[in-house]
Image (spheres, helix red, strand yellow):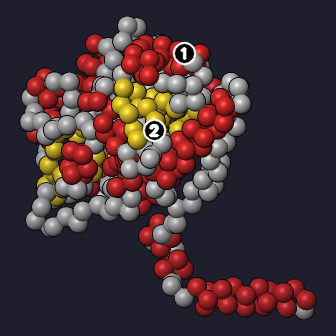
Amino acid sequence: MRDYVYHVGSPIEMEHHARPLMDAFDVRIETAECVVKLAQPGDLCLFYNEFYPSYRVAIHKLAHQNCATLYAIDGILEWRSLWDFPPGISCLWSARPILCHKVACIGRSQARIMGSWGYGSRCEIVGVPRFDRLLNQTRRVRRPDEPFTILITTAKAPGFNAAQMERAANALRDLKNWFERCGEIGGVKVRPLWRITLGLEAQIGVSNELRDTTGADLASVLEQVDAMITTPSTCMLEGMMQGIPVALLDYNNAPHLVPAAWRITASEHIEQVLAELVNPPLENMHWQCHLLNDALECQTPALPRMVELVSAMRRQAQQQVAAGSRIRFDSHLLSPPPAATSAVAVPMNYPALFPENPLFADPDVIRLQTEVADLRDALTQQRAA
């Protein structure tokens, strides 16, 4: 019989979040109201956000019931949803403080941000299990007769108030106007593919390719495109995993907790950024690789880490409850990923980065090392003479 855990939310919103764990555990999807009634001391309850008031109330009640709680983050942190969110729908101080016993962070930078708020001991670097299917993906090879296709997409919520929604609409409209006016770069035909939300497609007058927001639709779309332009969204990481150049579209001029190698923050940037997306400089692509590895733990599959974390939390919680103790967890239940506190090394293609230096183009490294040794030996003898 498999161990059971609770995943909190409605079945419609939670199924794609919970699916990766279903082979390892008996995952019981329950609403926030129901899980408080069902969970027993020592049980583990997973939350995919701490934003909604009903979830926050449930976390508080579960803590009083001595149930373990895990904030299983499924995406990036976004400045506006943390600091500029309008009152009513969500808590204005979400994650400050963090309510759950533990946080499954998607990557190093997220753990550092939460650590800066004083919650480093709760952070475990896991990744996003549903992204495991994208590991080792490569961008498509475009045929010479095909247009260069750029996916233009938005977050589920491209804005949190009327002013932010208007800026998102203006940014998309500027892109649409560029494609209608130009349509090619350096003789290469450029085609937009629109995948946008909340009725913005009707507002700016484009045909929308959005089919669902669970991730399955996006994964198939990414196999058909050559670059991505997106408002701040978790989908930017999916594009980076696909190996395509990704530009961040944001007229709000807000801080970016997850940056990109290209940014469009005003209409004046569109021409330059589109030209570089069609012919991405190697240094930008190298920087994008670093940003991806900093924002998302994706060197190895995330699901085994999530299973290990859930198992460890469930085991320790039940042991402590059996001993008559309140639930507390150690600072690090998971071993930190390799180089968790430093940058992930992304090998540099020196010949392509520095074509003006012919020495980098020489593949005979042993000969070059011998040449350096000979020059040093000659210099030593010259100094001794």
Image disc number at residue 187: none
* Residue in view at x 31 percent, y 25 percent: 10
Answer yes or no: is residue 192 visible: yes
- Tell me the quadrant of the picture where the C terminus can be found: bottom right
Name the residue that disc number 1 marks.
Answer: 60
Q: Is residue 216 left or right of residue 88?
A: left
Question: For the view shown, which residue lies furthest in the front direction?
Answer: 1
Q: Observer-nearest residue: 28 or 363?
A: 28
* Residue in view at x 13 percent, y 57 percent: 147
Whether residues under marks 2 and 1 lie with C-beta atoms below 8 angstroms apart, the answer is no
Q: Observer-nearest residue: 158 or 282?
A: 158
> Of marks 2 and 1, which one's residue comes earlier in the chain?
2
Q: Secondary structure under badge 1?
A: helix
Name the residue that disc number 2 marks.
Answer: 4
**Residue 274, position as x, y percentages in the image:** 27, 47
Q: Where 204 sits versus 75, above or below?
A: above
Disc 2 residue type?
A: Tyr
**Residue 129, position as x, y percentages in the image:** 42, 47
Disc 1 residue type?
A: His
Answer yes or no: is residue 128 visible: no
Mark 1: few/some/many CA within 10 Å (<14, 14-19, 20+): some
Q: Where 47 sits versus 33, above or below?
A: below
Per the model, the C-alpha gap separating discs 2 and 1 is 21 Å
**Residue 234, position as x, y percentages in the image:** 37, 39
Q: Quadrant of residue 49?
A: top left
